[in-house]
Image (tube, helix red, strand yellow):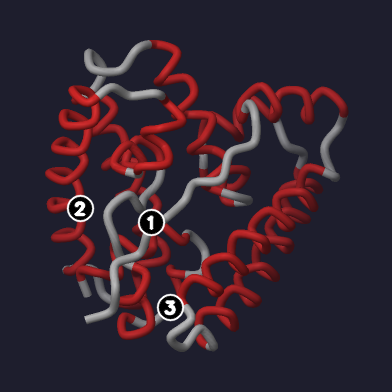
Amino acid sequence: MRTLGITVLALGMAAAIAAPAQAQGFRGRGMGTGYMLLSNKSVQEELKLDEGQVAKVTKVVDEVRAKMTEKVADIPDDERREKLPAIARAASDEVKTAVKDVLKPEQSKRLEQVSRQAQGIQAFLTDPEVREKLQLTDDQRSKITQISEDSMAQMREIFQNAGDDRQAAMQNMTALRKESVQKAVDLFSADQKKTWKEMTGEPFDVKFEPWPAN
């Protein structure tokens, strides 16, 4: 059960509906959302963290993840999808507070941009800051929700059919997540598109490195 908590935060929509046995192959350090991404090597490189920063932020994230997965382990299966986003945000906020004097302002800004990209379409539905700044209409929210549900169904199929080829499954999920985001962005006005671009910066793909299956 503990591995499921980490996986959900890493894979978002798909892992939230995956069974624990299926999820185990996708666990690993550097998975997560928001400031939890600070332990991800590719993100550390993108932020240009020095060795001292890497050591400090990794220690903080590992400690917060340990507490987070304890919470997830106690959540009934039928309640995970509803409660995990709040747990993920709380974990990210805890890390953010702990590393405020470790990261430079420009590093924090870029991390938040990268995190929004990593959230995929869920950023439009669950991220309070994104929702506030984009000011989505009811019609846009309805259509984005449908896009999200369709994407979840496809991700479930990918997850269930992953077998031993976990890397291919993750690549397919990444491509699907990008496709769903683009469908959502296509619904935006010119001003909303400009705001979203400012909130995400230059495109960046977080490289997750799953641990080998036991």
Foreground pick, 71 / 25: 25
Where is residue 9 drawn, in percent x and y?
A: 38, 56
Q: CA distance from mark 2 to mark 1?
A: 10 Å
**Disc 2 on helix, strand or loop?**
helix
Q: Earlier in the sequence, mark 2 or mark 3?
A: 3
**Tags 2 and 1 touching, CB below 8 Å:** yes
**Tags 2 and 3 touching, CB below 8 Å:** no
For the residue marked with disc 1, what is the amino acid? Leu
Left or right: 48, with 147 as reference point: left
For disc 1, the neighbor class at 10 Å (few under 14, some 14 to 19, many from 20) is many
Residue sitting at x 26%, y 42%: 91
Left or right: 90, with 43 as reference point: left
Q: Earlier in the sequence, mark 2 or mark 1?
A: 1
The residue where tag 1 is placed is 9
Where is residue 166 drawn, in percent x and y?
A: 46, 76
Residue sitting at x 38%, y 58%: 209
Q: Quadrant of the rendered structure where residue 45 is?
A: top left
The residue where tag 2 is placed is 68
Q: Is residue 16 above or below residue 53?
A: below
Q: Quadrant of the rendered structure where residue 59 is?
A: top left
Which mark, residue 18?
3
Task: Residue lying at the far front in this picture: please name it.
Answer: 51
Q: CA distance from mark 2 to mark 3?
A: 18 Å
For disc 3, the neighbor class at 10 Å (few under 14, some 14 to 19, many from 20) is some
**Disc 1 on helix, strand or loop?**
helix
Q: Work out which quarter of the rendered image holds the N terminus and state it.
A: bottom left
Q: CA distance from mark 3 to mark 1?
A: 12 Å
Q: Work out which quarter of the rendered image holds the C terminus and state it.
A: bottom left
Where is residue 208 drawn, in percent x and y?
A: 42, 55
Where is residue 82 drawn, in percent x and y?
A: 41, 62
For disc 2, the neighbor class at 10 Å (few under 14, some 14 to 19, many from 20) is some
For the residue marked with disc 3, what is the amino acid? Ala
